[in-house]
Every structure is written in C-alpha cells, then in structure tokens.
Amino acid sequence: MIPTETLARWQSAAPFWLSFLLIPLVWLVASQGGWWLLAVPLSTWWAFAIYDQVTGLNEENADPQTGDGALGWYILLPKLWVPLQFVTLYGLIWYATRADHLSTLEKIALFFGVGVITGTIGINYSHELMHQKNRFERWLGDILLAMVLYSHFRSEHLLVHHRHVGTPRDPVTARYNEGFHRFYPRVLVQCLRSAFRAEREMLARKDRPWTDPANPFWRYWALQGGMLALAGLLGGWAGIGLFLVQAGIAIWQLELVNYVEHYGLTRKHLGEGKYEHVMPRHSWNAAQKASNWLLINLQRHSDHHYKPDRRFPLLQNHTEADAPQLPYGYPVMTVAAMIPPLWRRVMNPRVRAWRKRYYPEITDWKPYNKALNPAPR
C-alpha cells in the first residue's frame, strides 16, 4: 500500500500535472490532421478559461517554510517535462516531415500548436528552473530555452527584469497605453541587448572581456546551434522551418505574459536615478485556480518578485489589499492583450485606480507613461 502521507502529497500536486496531457494530445493531433489541429490552442487558451469559471479562485497559502523534502512531486514536474518536450518536439519534426497525410499548411498549424506548448508550458517551466540554486535545475532551464531559441531570457530575467522591474530600465515592463503590437517588437530587440550588456558588465567588474568563456552567451549559442542542427538532421530544411515556427510562437506566448504581468505598474522615482524597492503592488495577480494549475502559480507574480527563488507551490497569494488583481486569469487576459482597444478599455481604468490608491501624491504621470528605452548605465 502507498503510505498515506505520500498519497496525500501526490493528491496535492496532481492538478499541476495536467499540462502533461498535452503531450499525448499533440501526438493525436499530428496523426489526425485537419480540424484536430485546433485542439492544442483551444485546450490551453479556451478550455482553461472555462475551467477557471468552474473551479473559481484559490486564495489559500502553503506554509512558505516547507522544505524540499515535502515537495518531491512538485519539484519533479518541471524536471520531467524537459526530456518529454525534447522527445516530442524532435519526434514530431521527424514524423511531420515524412507524413503524407499532412499538407504544408497543416504541418505549420501543427507546429503552431507545438509552439503554444513549448511557450506556455516549456518556457514557464524553464522560468521555475532558472530561479533555483541547484546547478542541474538551471541547466535544465537552459535546455528548455534553447529549444525555442530564447536562451538570453535567463540573463535578461535574472539580471535585468528582477532588478529593474517597474522602471524605464526594464524592457518588459509594459508602459501605460503601450499596445502589445508596439511592445512586442520593442522587447525582442531591447531584451537581447540588455541581457548581453548585463553579462558583459558583470565580467567587466572582474576585469574580464565579454569574450571570456565564463560569458553564458557562449553556452546559449552552442545549445541553440545544436537544437537547430538536430532539427535539420531529422527533417532537413523543412524540419528547420517547423522548428522556427514553434520557436516563434513560443516567444510570442512568453512576451504576451510579460506584457500582462506588469502593464502600467511603475515604481516611484526617488530622484537621481533611484526607485523605491519592489513591492507586491508592482505586479498584476490572478487567483484563478485552473490557470494557476496550468502555469504552476505564475499568476502569483507579486510573491515571485518578493521571493524569486521560492518554489512554485509555496508562492503566496496576495489579495487586493496588497497587490492589484486581474479580472481574469492569463488565458483570457493574453487574448485581450492582442486586441489593444479592448485591453485599454479593461485595464487603463484599473491602472488609474492603482495610481490613485498607492501614489496620490504624484500629479504628473507623463514621465511614467512613456515607453522609454532602457536608460544607459
């Protein structure tokens, strides 16, 4: 018999494993083609939006002092995803490039769905892994990011975003009234630049050039090159093309979430280039239960910025008293972000209310509204 304590821990973690059902689903979709190709995006964006309405909110908090020994099923989840995604991605490249029942358009649609998975799940799990102290887990995070050609996200996120969130130095803090379609091309360029600059400056403080082997960009480029080469070996130029399709969709999914997480929320400028400390109020939160299962509590974003290395099951829910709340979970809000007039109608009044609540003394918000380039350092 399974010990009662072990069973209880598994039952607690089980809902977060729902994402693993996407693996057999995408293989089923690949074997059928046709309208089945809609199943993957529908099962993530739309199905979980419905599940959120059915399951409601989860405002309960685990004991943040819980040790890793009691979190085994949670810790295993993102680790196990890495080989499963690898086998699925490259297995489908091999399969699709030889599948006579799939037209070129169907193959592209299939890898659109694969990109939804590698972005919504894979990059999110890499985010969990990169924040851990264990070197093996951080390497697993690097492997996931290399599969979508976005390895620099690790440097940008750890060295730039967490340090400068809510300020002009953070590219991925979406400014007030900045639509996603302006935000997206901006961050693609600025995040790469700021990530490389952050690593270069770290090496410079040790009197080392950017070409030093310790620069993680060498690892990033090697891993990404290896991923592209493997796609080519398995599927030729068509395999590389399909690989690039899924990578592009995955990056788009990531930046949609980045856009939603901090839209219009800025830290108060204290003068001389200094800003107040990061507080829970500087992230949008969502307590929708089902989408937090899918996204391993990413929507408890305020607590993540407060304790970046806290494992996802221990992230605390911040209520309206401490942090701003989204009206819906990420599956709904990311779709809304793609429609700027709808997004502004829903979110701009909430940003203005947030400003009045936390910063009534600020009368001129024009400097905070501008989508500025990161300030030079």
Image: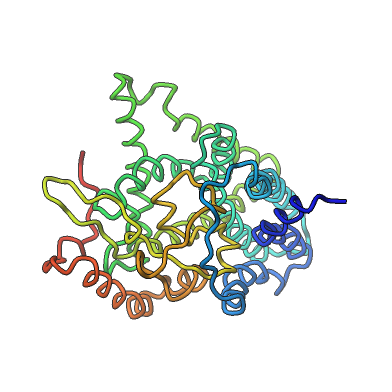
- Indicate the quadrant where residue 204 lies: top left
Residue 175, above or below 88: below
Left or right, 198 with reference to 364? right
Residue under the point 45% across and 61% down? 257
Q: Position of residue 164 (x, y in %)?
A: 29, 47
Q: Position of residue 34 (x, y in %)?
A: 72, 72
Q: Position of residue 152 (x, y in %)?
A: 44, 41
Residue under the point 33% across and 36% down? 198
Quarter containing the C terminus: top left
Residue 105, above or below 185: below
> Looking at the image, which is closer to me, 230 or 322?
322
Left or right, 151 with reference to 186? right
- Indicate the quadrant where residue 72 lies: top right
Residue under the point 34% across and 79% down? 341
> Looking at the image, which is closer to me, 1 or 144?
1
Protein image colouring: rainbow
> Number of callouts in the render?
0
